[in-house]
Image (tube, helix red, strand yellow):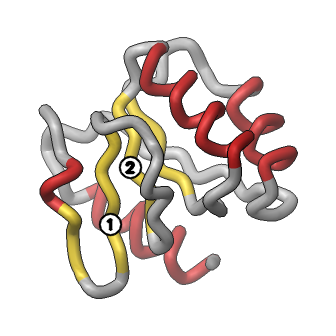
């Protein structure tokens, strides 16, 4: 995961429209770890990328993120029931049909 975080930070640093990119390492990918991280998000955050498991609590947390007006990208593993404004980036490619700008 550290390699992935480093690649994301390097890539974001080269994009002129990305003002900043902060990676937060969580205690795991459980819904509890995700909930704790979301509760500590800055209110100024424009978007969130997560690696998460498909679980009812996770889906509710992701729905809350989108309802708060933040863009959401699931990384590596998709959460199929995530809100439709979500987008998934997998190792095999982007799932553009989930994309809404």
Name the one closer to the observer, 19 or 35: 35
Residue at screen point 81% across, 63% down? 28
* Left or right of residue 54, residue 93 in this image: left
Name the one closer to the observer, 33 or 25: 33
**Residue 39, image x and y in percent?**
75, 24
Note whether 51 is above or below 47 in the view shown: below
Q: Residues within 10 Å of mark 2 (few under 14, many from 20)?
A: many
* Left or right of residue 39, residue 93 in this image: left
Q: Residues within 10 Å of mark 1 (few under 14, many from 20)?
A: some
Q: Which residue is mark 1?
A: 89
Residue at screen point 41% across, 74% down? 7
**Residue 83, image x and y in percent?**
40, 36
Name the one closer to the observer, 70 or 80: 80
Q: Which residue is mark 2?
A: 73
* Left or right of residue 48, residue 40 in this image: right
**Residue 76, image x and y in percent?**
46, 73
Residue at screen point 13% across, 32% down? 101
Dots 1, 2 in contact, CB < 8 A: yes
- Separation of disc 1 and disc 2 at Cα? 7 Å
Residue at screen point 30% across, 51% down? 87
Which part of the image, by quadrant, shows the N terminus?
bottom right
| Total number of numbered discs in the rendering | 2
Mark 1, secondary structure of its residue: strand
Q: Earlier in the sequence, mark 1 or mark 2?
A: 2
Mark 2, secondary structure of its residue: strand
Q: Quadrant of residue 64?
A: top right
Note whether 13 is above or below 78 in the view shown: above
Q: Which mark is residue 44?
A: none
**Residue 53, image x and y in percent?**
65, 62
């Amino acid at each position: 995961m550290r390699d992935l975080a480093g690649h994301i930070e390097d890539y974001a640093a080269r994009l002129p429209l990305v003002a900043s990119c902060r990676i937060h390492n969580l205690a795991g990918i459980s819904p509890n770890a995700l909930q704790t991280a979301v509760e500590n998000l800055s209110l100024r955050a424009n978007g969130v990328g997560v690696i998460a498991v498909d679980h009812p609590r996770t889906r509710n947390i992701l729905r809350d993120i989108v309802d708060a007006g933040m863009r959401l990208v699931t990384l590596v593993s998709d959460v199929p029931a995530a809100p439709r404004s979500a987008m998934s980036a997998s190792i095999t490619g982007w799932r553009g049909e989930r994309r809404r700008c």
